[in-house]
Image (cartoon, rainbow, N blue to C red):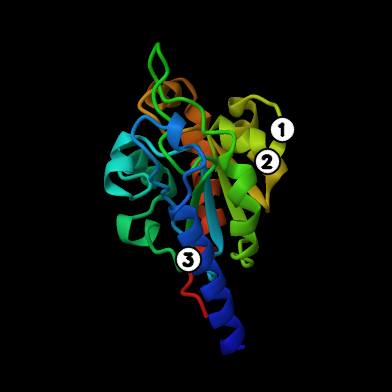
């Protein structure tokens, strides 16, 4: 079994090396390619998000910004646990920073990225039990068209495989104040769902 585990880890490491060398979207990326992801073959919880922002691009660390602080608050999780890739994988739909829209806000994830890499990455992480679908792009890719708020409110319909969440941007603070059910109903269920997946990997 150890040999199989080592082989799987080598396969994932080889794939990640290919991803880090990817230049498919280079001409469309204002800051150039810098794929950001966190993964291991033993992770059981997957955070599927949108795409890196500028600070994540600079540091190479997913959710290393205010949105990450908000997300970790929702999860009731400290940074050490959040970045423990032996238990948690973080794979955005677009692995590189896509740039800004003319009227503000980040551009959508590059459409080339997920078809190139996502299925191959997920095949190397076979123990994923629950996927947090963070924001509209991750939800659309997995669940198809729909409203984020409707899905978040109806989160039980997607368990035990998926848990839809809003994108934890600064704009979400005002939304949370208008939707007290999010803190009262969704967050306790979210923390209960992820808790058993954070046990140390065998």
- The residue nearer to you, when weighing 51 against 33, is 33
Residue that badge 3 annotates: 87
Binning the other alpha carbons within 10 Å of mark 2 as few (below 14), some (14 to 19) or many (20 upward) gives few
Binning the other alpha carbons within 10 Å of mark 1 as few (below 14), some (14 to 19) or many (20 upward) gives few
SS for tag 1?
Answer: loop
Q: Which residue is drawn at 32% across and 61% down?
A: 80
SS for tag 3?
Answer: loop
Q: Residue at x 54, y 69 (%)?
A: 41
- The residue nearer to you, when weighing 140 against 20, is 20
Residue 45 placement: quadrant: bottom right
Label 3, label 1: how far apart the Cα atoms are:
27 Å
Label 2, label 1: how far apart the Cα atoms are:
6 Å
Label 3, label 2: how far apart the Cα atoms are:
22 Å
As drawn, 64 above or below 121 = above
Binning the other alpha carbons within 10 Å of mark 3 as few (below 14), some (14 to 19) or many (20 upward) gives many
Instruction: Tell me which label, 3 or 1, sits earlier in the chain.
Output: 3
The mark lying in front, picked from 3 and 2, is: 2
Residue that badge 1 annotates: 144
Q: Residue at x 51, y 40 (%)?
A: 94
* Residue 76: percent from left, percent from top: 39, 51
Taking the image as drawn, is residue 200 in sight?
yes
The reply, left or right, for residue 26 in relation to residue 141 is: left
* Residue 113: percent from left, percent from top: 56, 42
Quarter of the figure that contains the N terminus: bottom right
Taking the image as drawn, is residue 163 in sight?
no
The reply, left or right, for residue 41 in relation to residue 58 is: right
Residue that badge 2 annotates: 142
| Tally of numbered discs | 3
* Residue 61: percent from left, percent from top: 33, 50
* Residue 189: percent from left, percent from top: 55, 47
SS for tag 2?
Answer: helix
* Label 2 close to label 1 by CB (< 8 Å): yes
């Amino acid at each position: 079994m150890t040999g199989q585990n080592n082989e799987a880890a080598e396969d994932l490491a080889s794939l990640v090396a290919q991803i880090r060398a990817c230049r498919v979207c280079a001409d469309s990326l204002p800051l150039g390619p810098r794929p950001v992801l966190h993964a291991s073959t033993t992770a059981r919880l997957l955070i599927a998000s949108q795409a890196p922002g500028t600070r994540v691009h600079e540091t190479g660390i997913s959710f290393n910004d205010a949105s990450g602080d908000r997300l970790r608050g929702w999860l009731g999780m400290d940074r050490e646990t959040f970045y423990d890739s032996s238990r948690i994988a973080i794979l955005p739909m677009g692995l590189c920073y896509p740039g800004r829209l003319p009227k503000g806000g980040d551009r959508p994830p590059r459409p080339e990225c997920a078809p190139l890499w996502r299925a191959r990455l997920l095949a190397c992480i076979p123990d994923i039990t629950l996927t947090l679908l963070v924001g509209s792009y991750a939800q659309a890719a997995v669940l198809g068209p729909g409203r984020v708020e409707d899905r978040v409110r109806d989160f039980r319909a997607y368990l035990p495989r998926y848990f839809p969440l809003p994108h934890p941007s600064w704009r979400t603070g005002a939304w949370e104040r208008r939707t007290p059910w999010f803190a009262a109903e969704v967050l306790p269920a979210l923390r209960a769902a992820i808790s058993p997946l954070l046990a140390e990997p065998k």
